[in-house]
Image (cartoon, helix red, strand yellow):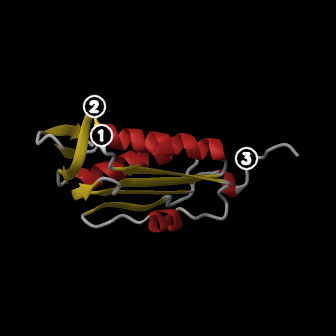
Amino acid sequence: MAPTFDHPGEQAAQEPIKLIAIRDSALSLDEVFRAVGDDSSGGTALFVGTVRNHDGGADVDELGYSCHPSAEAEMRRIAEKVVAEYPVRALAAVHRVGDLRVGDLAVVVAVSCPHRGEAFEACRKLIDDLKHEVPIWKHQRFSDGTEEWVGAC
């Protein structure tokens, strides 16, 4: 059977942005995954960013994220761009601020689309643009006692 794109499930949803948030508490994969559940989606892509134990050849002990008051609005603006470019049925993005330890979840984003390829592409676009455009800063503390600030995300 040839694919048909005139079914409503093949189109972007009317209100696809389900969850956009900056949180100072632990993030939940289940919450984000539930937010993007959609019966007309054949593909859901989820990205989880965690605090790793190294950066630039140095051991990382912990880090802190802080953000500009406009960060959540910027996340929504980026989500709207992704929705305009892909047939998104549901989208969610949550970023953590505050002090985090190695292994903690820093960001969780998910996108549901009619097909897997679209979901992968939209999710990648979402996380890449969030990382480059949202005013969130990372303060890394290294095992050797040094520290550094890293630009947006």
The three-letter amino acid code for the residue at tag 2 is Gly
Q: Residues within 10 Å of mark 2 (few under 14, many from 20)?
A: few
Determine which residue is flagged by label 2. 57
State the SS at label 3: loop
State the SS at label 1: strand
- Residue 84 visible: no
The three-letter amino acid code for the residue at tag 1 is His
Of callouts 3 and 1, which one flags the residue occurring earlier in the amino acid sequence?
3
Discs 3/1, front: 1
- What percent of the width, then of the height, locates residue 52? 33, 46
The three-letter amino acid code for the residue at tag 3 is Phe
State how far apart marks 2 and 3 are (Cα): 49 Å
State how far apart marks 2 and 1 are (Cα): 7 Å
In the image: residue 111, left or right of residue 96: right
Mark 2 in CB contact with mark 3 (< 8 angstroms): no
Q: Residue, x 53% and y 59% (percent of image)?
A: 14
Q: Which mark is residue 5?
A: 3
In the image: residue 106, left or right of residue 2: left
Discs 2/3, front: 2
Determine which residue is flagged by label 1. 54
State the SS at label 2: loop
- What percent of the width, then of the height, locates residue 87? 58, 47
State how far apart marks 3 and 1 are (Cα): 46 Å
Q: Which mark is residue 120?
A: none
Q: Residue, x 55% and y 40% (percent of image)?
A: 121
Mark 2 in CB contact with mark 1 (< 8 angstroms): yes
